[in-house]
Image (cartoon, helix red, strand yellow):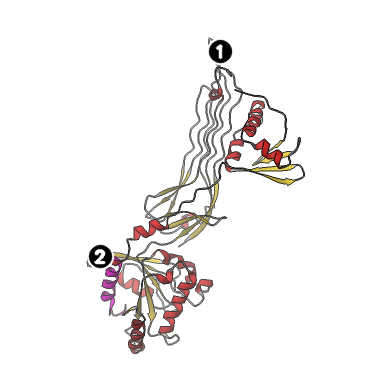
C-alpha cells in the first residue's frame, strides 16, 4: 500500500539514575562514596533508506521509543547507555513538527541521518560530588527524561519528470510504454490510485518519471484523488502535461488551461515549472482532427507541443529525446534539493517563564529548566536543598516573587509540585 503521510510520536530514552553508595570493605575504614553515574538515554534518528518508496512501515507504529539508560551502581559502576533508535524513511521525506507545522528537515539522500529526539543525560552518582570539603555526599541525580516529539512525515517523490493532466489522458499508458513500470490501466476515471515511478532509458541516458492520479477541476480544494498527490510534483524538474485529443466531452485547449489553473491554485510554484504539452491518442481519428488547431494555438502561446500514440509508438522517441535534452538544460537536481532543506533549532531553550494558574498556584515553563529540575530526587533531603539553591542561582525565586508568589504557594514544574519558601536554604559545597 502506498502511504505518503503519517503522524508519529517519537520518544528518546530516559537517562539512568545515579547511585548513592559507600565503599564498605573489612580493611578499608574510610572507603568513601562510590556511586556510579547513570547511562545516557537512547537518541531517536530518522535515516534515509533508498530501498523504501513509501511510509507504510510507519502507518501503524504511532509511538516509537528508544531504550532508556541503565542506572549507575556501587563501586563506581556507570550505567550502560540506552540503544539509539533509527527509523528508516524513503528518500524525499519532509519532517514537520506536527503541532507547530514547522519543517524540521528534508531527507533526500540515501544514508542521510537526522537527530529528531535527544536522549536524556544520565544522573551523576554521589562519587561525582565528593570533594575535599564535602567527603560524604548522600545525594545522586536522577536521569533526565528524553525528548518527546510529535512529527508529521510527508513523502514527496523524487523524480525528474512528472506526468500531469486529467484522468484518462494516457499518463499510465505512456509510462508503461516507455519504462518497465506497470501501472493499472483501464478505460475509466481515477485508474491510478497512487503515484507510480518508472525509469526511462534511451541512448545511454536515463531519467525517472512519476505518474500521478489525474487532476480534476477544483482539485486544489480536495476534489477528486489527484489533490492528495500534488505535493509529489514539487520535486520534479519538468512536467509533461498530457491531453486527450480524442476526448469528445472536453475541449483539449480548455483542458490545458483548467489543469494549469489547478497548478497555480495549489501554489508551490508548480505552474512555473518547465512544461511540455503532449497530445495523446493520435491513433484515433478524432485526435488527428483536433491536432492541427491544438498545436497552432499552444505554439503561439509559447508552449512546446508534441503528438504521441503510446499504442502505435508514434512520436514517443521524439518526445523522449527532447526530454533528455531539456533535463540537461535545467539546474542540477541536487542543488534544488539542498535549497529546500531546512533545519529548525528551538530558540530560547535557556529561558523560562512563570505562569499564574490560579490563586496561590504557579507553573514554571522552560525546556532546560524543567530538564534540570527532573534530575533531583526529592525523596532525598539533600536533593531538596540542592534544588532550592539551583532555583535561587537561576533567578527562579526572584521571578516567582515578581509574579506574586508568596510563602506557602504551590509551584508546579513538569511532573513536580513543591511549596514556595522564601527562607535561605542550606549550602552544600
Q: Is residue 148 visible?
A: yes
Range shown magenta: 306-328
Percent coordinates x, y for residue 218 in the rendering: 51, 76
In what quadrant of the picture does the C terminus appear? top right
Secondary structure type for disc 1: loop
The residue that appears at 28% across and 79% down in the rendered structure is 315
Which residue was labeled with disc 1? 30
Observer-nearest of 284 and 341: 341
Q: Say which quarter of the image contains residue 275.
A: bottom left
User: Label 2: few (<14), some or many (≥20) within 10 Å?
Assistant: few
The answer to whether residue 246 is left or right of residue 364 is: left
Residue count near mark 1 (Cα–Cα under 10 Å), binned few <14, some 14–19, many ≥20: few
* Helix, strand or loop at mark 2: strand
Establish if 372 lies above or below 305. Answer: above
Q: Where is residue 396 in the image (x, y as percent from the top left)?
A: 65, 37
Identify the residue position indicated by label 2 in the image.
205
Front in this rendered view, residue 123 or 72: 123
Q: Which residue reaches farthest left?
A: 203
**Image-based side of 349 in relation to 419, left or right:** left
Cα separation between marks 2 and 1: 78 Å
Amino acid at each position: 500500500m502506498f502511504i505518503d503521510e503519517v503522524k508519529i510520536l517519537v520518544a528518546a530514552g530516559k537517562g539512568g539514575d545515579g547511585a548513592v553508595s559507600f565503599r564498605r570493605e573489612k580493611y578499608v575504614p574510610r572507603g568513601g562514596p562510590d556511586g556510579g553515574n547513570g547511562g545516557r538515554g537512547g537518541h531517536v534518528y530518522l535515516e534515509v533508506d533508498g530501498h523504501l518508496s513509501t511510509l507504510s512501515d510507519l502507518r501503524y507504529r504511532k509511538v516509537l521509543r528508544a531504550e532508556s539508560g541503565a542506572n549507575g551502581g556501587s563501586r563506581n559502576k556507570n550505567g550502560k547507555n540506552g540503544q539509539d533508535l533509527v527509523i528508516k524513511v524513503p528518500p524525499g521525506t519532509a519532517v514537520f513538527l506536527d503541532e507547530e507545522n514547522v519543517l524540521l528537515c528534508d531527507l533526500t539522500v540515501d544514508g542521510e541521518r537526522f537527530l529528531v529526539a535527544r536522549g536524556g543525560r544520565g544522573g551523576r552518582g554521589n562519587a561525582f560530588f565528593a570533594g575535599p570539603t564535602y567527603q560524604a555526599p548522600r545525594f545522586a541525580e536522577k536521569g533526565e527524561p528524553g525528548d518527546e516529539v510529535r512529527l508529521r512525515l510527508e513523502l514527496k517523490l523524487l523524480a525528474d519528470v512528472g506526468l500531469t493532466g486529467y484522468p484518462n489522458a494516457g499518463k499510465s499508458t505512456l509510462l508503461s510504454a516507455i519504462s518497465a513500470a506497470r501501472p493499472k490501466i483501464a478505460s475509466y476515471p481515477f485508474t491510478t490510485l497512487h503515484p507510480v515511478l518508472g525509469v526511462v532509458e534511451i541512448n545511454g541516458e536515463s531519467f525517472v518519471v512519476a505518474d500521478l492520479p489525474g487532476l480534476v477541476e477544483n482539485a486544489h480544494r480536495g476534489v477528486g484523488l489527484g489533490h492528495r498527490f500534488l505535493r509529489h510534483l514539487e520535486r520534479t524538474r519538468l512536467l509533461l502535461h498530457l491531453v486527450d485529443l480524442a476526448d469528445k466531452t472536453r475541449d483539449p485547449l480548455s483542458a490545458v488551461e483548467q489543469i494549469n489553473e489547478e497548478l497555480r491554485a495549489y501554489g508551490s510554484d508548480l505552474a512555473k515549472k518547465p512544461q511540455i504539452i503532449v497530445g495523446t491518442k493520435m491513433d484515433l481519428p478524432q485526435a488527428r482532427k483536433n491536432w492541427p488547431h491544438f498545436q497552432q494555438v499552444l505554439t503561439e502561446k509559447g508552449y512546446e507541443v508534441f503528438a504521441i500514440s503510446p499504442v502505435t509508438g508514434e512520436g514517443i522517441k521524439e518526445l523522449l529525446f527532447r526530454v533528455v535534452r531539456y533535463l540537461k538544460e535545467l539546474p542540477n537536481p541536487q542543488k534544488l534539493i539542498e535549497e529546500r532543506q531546512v533545519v529548525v533549532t528551538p530558540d530560547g531553550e535557556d529561558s523560562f517563564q512563570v505562569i499564574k494558574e490560579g490563586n496561590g498556584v504557579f507553573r514554571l515553563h522552560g525546556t532546560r529548566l524543567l530538564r534540570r529540575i527532573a534530575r533531583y530526587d526529592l525523596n532525598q533531603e539533600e536533593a531538596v536543598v540542592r534544588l532550592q539553591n539551583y532555583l535561587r542561582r537561576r533567578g527562579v525565586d526572584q521571578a516567582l516573587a515578581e509574579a506574586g508568589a508568596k510563602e506557602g504557594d504551590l509551584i508546579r514544574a513538569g511532573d513536580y509540585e513543591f511549596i514556595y519558601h522564601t527562607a535561605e536554604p542550606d549550602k552544600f559545597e
